[in-house]
Every structure is written in C-alpha cells, then in structure tokens.
C-alpha cells in the first residue's frame, strides 16, 4: 500500500537523509541490528536515516512511542518484530516516519538516539532458523545449465516449479564477512577420481534475500493472496559458490558443501512497506506457461514483481593496495526473476511446510538476458574460459584469495524517492591449513 510514508516530498530533520543519492531517505527506514564499533555494548535493533542509525533501545527509553512494535525491538534481534506481521509493522513505520520528519516536535530528544553509521558494527539482523535458496532467474538457470549439462541446459521442471534447496543458516554472515577458501572433493580436468583440495573455481552469486515476517502453522500453506503479508523485507545476498566442488557433488540431491561454507548478507533489511512504490506487473516472455493456480493471483499479475536494480563489484587485494576503487562486473534487476516473492512463499509452504519469522529465502542468482547482466563469474567468464580483465591489468576467471566482492542495490521510479539497500561486502581468505 502506498501511504503518507512514501510521499516523495517528505524531508527529515536528519539532513543527510535528504540528498537525492541517499540510500536511506525518510521514505526507506530499513532495520538492522548494531552497536557502537569496537565496544562490548549489547547489539540492538536500529533504523537507518541518512548517515545515522536511530537506536531503538534509546527510542524506547524516551517514551515518545509506546507500541507493541517498539516493545518487540527491546531484544538483540528483529525476530519478535518480524513475527508481529505486516499490519503492525506498517503502523510502526508510520510512527517512525512522523518522528523523523522536519516538523517533528521532538528533535532535541531524538538526537540523543542517533549513532553515526560510520561508528557502528553490525550483527545478523535476526536469528535465521532456516535458509532456502531458490534459482529464479531463467537466464542464470540456462547459462549455468549449459555449462553443467550442454545437452539439456534447462530441465523440464524449471517452468513449473520454483526450484530451490534447503541451505545452511549457520554460516550466514553480515556484510564485512571473511571466510577461508573452502576445501573439498574436486575432479581435476581429464581425471575420473576426485582429490581433496582447496577450491579452484570459487564464485559469488548476486542475489536478493527475502526475510519471512509472520510465519504459518505447519500443515497450513500460505495462499497467494496472503503471501505478501508474510514477507518482512529484502536484503542483498551473496551465495558464495565453489563451482568445482558443486560439479562433482550436485547430482542427484543438489548443492551441499559447494554452498554451505559462507553466505554474506547486507546489514539493512528494506521492508516490504518501503518497497511498495516499486512493485510492477509480473510478466513472462511470450510462449512461457502461466503458473499453476496455487501460484497465481490477480495481485501477483498486476504487482507481484519488484523493480530492484542490482550491481556487483570486485576489489582485489592488489587494487586495494594501489588505492583503486572497486570495479563493476555486472548489473541486473530483480524483475529478471521468473518467479515472484509471493510465489516463492506460496510454493515453499504448499507442502504444509511452516515458515518462521526470520527465515531467509535467497532469490537465486539474478542474471538478465543481455551481456553485462550475468550475476556470477561462471556466467561472465563462460565457465572460466574467458577471464575478465580488470583496470589494473589483473584478470579473473574465478575469485582469488584477497578478493572482495561488493553487492549493491537500489529502487528508483518517477514520482518517488530513490531508496537504497546499502552494500553486502565479503572477502575471500586463503584456505585454512588442511590435509592437502
Ligand atoms: Mn544461489
């Protein structure tokens, strides 16, 4: 729903929120969990406004808002707030928006709740009980399918089932995450038997993460018309992938160790409410089948897709030491998705599976149809055959130790304020000492 909080003319008394390029204008109001850098303070929920965080524990102390939503923010995770559901969080957003507008009568008090974003460190925004990764870009599915299975790149189920697998939540980290290059079973070129070695074909995947809000009872699938009410918001998600381990292990049960060593998300969750102005019709190319009835609804057709611009950049260790800025590898858009967020939620629960507040769904690698929109190195380099040239003369077929990958995203539409996702940053470290 579009309401007063989306008014493009709203300005905040936090002046840094009012610039046209600000990721966090008053129309955004994303949530994270943070504390002051390098302190032993308790991590707590906060809201972003311009270049500041509004500490929700401090806000509670001021007594300016009394609501079940703010009470739910008094812990160290966002799960209790997420569980309250869409109607409550929409009201909370309106209350927060009013406090942060230029005409607020409480600026002096509220200023005591601000912490500069340059002085915070983040935790995961919630306890992620379960993590599921989907595969919703048909372009990514076709590009990678061709490399793994040249004869049948797109399997027949793809156009009917939102294909996914149950991932690993324990290794999900917030932006700034570092992790050692994984080791695993790899079949070297020309060999038939595997060796156990450090991954040689390490990749990123440019994805959006979808946080579940209110859950559903086991045995009671979420219907398409209700699915949007079960989504708290979106973040950026890098599904780091070991392609050589994946190629050997993935059949017949799907990804396992190739994906379970690290996943990096952005700290700020952009809420479903903030994304409302950027909803667009869900369409498929001519000749593609319509979804089955349990994955269809009128509102999904008219406004099921979300227009999110996505970008991935790399900065190698040598670029960092030369003071060179990150280099953009590709750009794509969430409208490249073959399935919508509501369809993922409805499909996930259609068996009777219960989702819980704070569960995370990955969209799958967002690749578009054209060159320059591939969401993973394996697609950009055609399986490593055509390495990317970087501005300092380095090349990359796959990621090297010390490489930092930076995901970014934003929404923009005529008549509304641009809102941003911030970044999800992760860095590959050398493989830990091991057997090989
Ligand atoms: Mn993935």
Image (tube, rainbow, N blue to C red):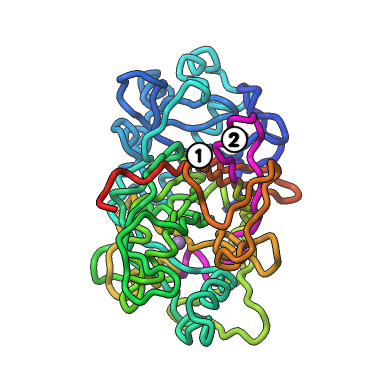
Question: 290 or 433, which is in the foreground?
Answer: 433
| Disc 1 residue: CB within 8 Å of ligand 1 | no
Task: Read off the magenta span.
Answer: 314-343
Q: Residue at x 70, y 40 (%)?
A: 8
Residue 236 visible from this viewpoint: yes
Residue 198, placed above or below residue 135: above
Other-residue count near label 1 (Cα within 10 Å), few / some / many at <14 / 14–19 / ≥20: many
Q: Residue at x 55, y 67 (%)?
A: 383
Q: Residue 36 location in percent, x, y?
A: 41, 21
The CA distance from mark 1 to mark 2 is: 8 Å
Q: Residue 311 location in percent, x, y?
A: 62, 50
Q: Residue 241 location in percent, x, y?
A: 43, 58
Residue 429, placed above or below residue 395: above
Along the polypeptide, which appears first: circle 1 or circle 2? 2
**Residue tagged by mark 1?**
30
Any magenta on residue 341? yes
The answer to whether 283 appears left or right of 211 in the picture is right
Residue 95, placed above or below residue 38: below
- Residue 247 position by quadrant: bottom left
The answer to whether 190 appears left or right of 274 in the picture is left
Residue 228 visible from this viewpoint: no
Toward the right, the furthest residue is: 414
Residue 377, placed above or below residue 22: below
Q: Residue 25 location in percent, x, y?
A: 62, 34
**Residue tagged by mark 2?**
24
- Residue 92 position by quadrant: top left
């Amino acid at each position: 729903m579009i309401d007063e909080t989306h008014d493009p003319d709203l300005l905040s008394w936090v002046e840094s929120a009012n610039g046209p390029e600000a990721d966090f204008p008053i129309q955004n109001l994303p949530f994270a969990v943070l504390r002051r850098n390098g302190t032993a303070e308790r991590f707590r929920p906060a809201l972003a406004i311009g270049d500041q965080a509004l500490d929700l524990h401090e806000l509670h102390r001021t007594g300016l808002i009394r609501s079940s939503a703010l009470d739910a923010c008094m812990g160290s995770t966002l799960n209790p707030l997420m569980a309250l559901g869409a109607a409550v969080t929409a009201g909370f957003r309106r209350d927060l928006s009013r406090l942060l507008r230029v005409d607020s009568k409480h600026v002096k008090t509220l200023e005591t709740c601000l912490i500069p974003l340059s002085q915070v460190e983040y935790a995961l925004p919630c306890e992620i009980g379960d993590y599921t990764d989907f595969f919703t870009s048909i372009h990514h599915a076709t590009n990678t399918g061709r490399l793994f299975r040249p004869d049948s790149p797109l399997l027949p189920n793809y156009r009917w089932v939102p294909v996914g697998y149950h991932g690993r939540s324990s290794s999900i980290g917030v932006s700034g995450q570092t992790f050692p290059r994984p080791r695993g079973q790899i079949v070297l070129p020309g060999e038939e038997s595997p060796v156990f070695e450090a991954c040689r074909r390490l990749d990123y995947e440019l994805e959006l993460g979808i946080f579940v809000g209110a859950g559903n009872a086991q045995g009671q699938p979420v219907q398409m018309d209700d699915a949007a009410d079960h989504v708290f918001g979106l973040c950026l998600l890098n599904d780091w992938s070991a392609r050589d381990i994946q190629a050997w292990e993935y059949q017949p049960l799907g990804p396992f160790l190739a994906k379970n060593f690290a996943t990096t998300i952005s700290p700020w969750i952009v809420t479903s409410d903030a994304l409302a102005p950027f909803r667009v019709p869900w369409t498929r190319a001519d000749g593609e089948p319509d979804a089955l009835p349990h994955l269809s609804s009128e509102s999904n057709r008219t406004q099921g897709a979300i227009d999110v611009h996505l970008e991935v950049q790399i900065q190698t260790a040598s670029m960092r030491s030369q003071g060179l800025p990150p280099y953009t590898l590709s750009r794509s858009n969430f409208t490249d998705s073959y399935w919508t967020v509501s369809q993922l939620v409805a499909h996930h629960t259609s068996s009777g599976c219960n989702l819980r507040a704070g569960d995370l769904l990955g969209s799958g690698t967002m690749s578009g149809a054209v060159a320059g929109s591939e969401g993973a190195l394996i697609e950009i380099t055609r399986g490593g055959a055509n390495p990317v040239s970087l501005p300092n003369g380095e090349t990359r077929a796959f990621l090297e130790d010390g490489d930092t990958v930076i995901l970014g995203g934003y929404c923009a539409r005529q008549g509304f304020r641009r809102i941003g996702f911030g970044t999800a940053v992760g860095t590959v470290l050398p493989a830990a000492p091991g057997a090989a």
